Image: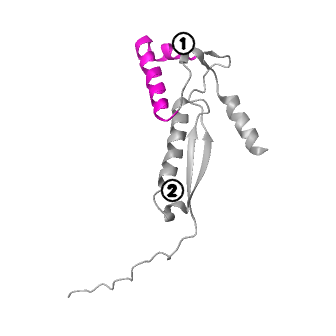
Amino acid sequence: MGRTLKSKPPITPPATISTFKIRLDITSDSTCPWCFITKRRITKAIELFHSLSAEARRVQFDIHWRPYQLDPMAPKEPIPKSKLYTRKFGPEKAIFVRERVMAAGRLEGIEFLNADDCLYCSTLNSHRLIRYARMK
């Protein structure tokens, strides 16, 4: 009436692993401040991971950056970024958005220029340039 299941022997990993690769595909816009902040955070996370043990240092991270346009309808001719933020978020929220980005950047050791000093335009050509550089 009762059935007994045969147990399988446990799977044991090899005693040593020479290297182990983890592939990270990251989609990013080339001029997005949050993407740059994320890049810095990923770098710090990998450094922290490698500091955990000798085994952790054997793990290699294979990072592949993928292009993404946050705003495919962005103008070809540059406009002040502060003007874009005001148009997109309204005057009060635009200030909050700028301050939040700058504060997050400072936490990662990044000093962004004030949005009043930055220009905003399509990033299509920057993605083309990055692709061209990779091909060379």
Residue carrying label 2: 50
Q: Is residue 103 above or below residue 59?
A: above
As rendered, which of 25 and 113 lies closer to the eye? 113
Establish if 109 lies above or below 43: above
Q: Quadrant of residue 128?
A: top right
Quarter of the picture holding the C terminus = top right
Q: Residue furthest left?
A: 1
Q: Main secondary structure of the magenta part?
A: helix
CB within 8 Å, label 1 to label 2 = no
Picture coordinates of residue 5 (x, y %)? 30, 84
Q: Quadrant of residue 31?
A: top right
**Residue bounds of the magenta highlight:** 81-109
Q: Is residue 24 magenta?
A: no
Q: Nearer the viewer, mark 1 or mark 2?
A: 2
Q: Give the residue type that dot 2 points to.
A: His
Give the residue at the far right of this rendering: 136
The foreground one among 114 and 119 is 114
Which residue is depicted at the point 57% across and 41% down? 27
Quadrant where the N terminus sits is bottom left
Badge 1 marks a residue whose secondary structure is helix
Label 1 Cα crowd, 10 Å radius (few <14 / some 14-19 / many 20+): some
Is residue 89 rendered magenta in the image?
yes
Q: In terms of sequence position, does the residue under pointer 1 or pointer 2 come before the other? A: 2
Query: From what the image shows, is residue 57 above or below residue 14?
Result: above
Pointer 1 residue: 83
Q: CA distance from mark 1 to mark 2?
A: 42 Å
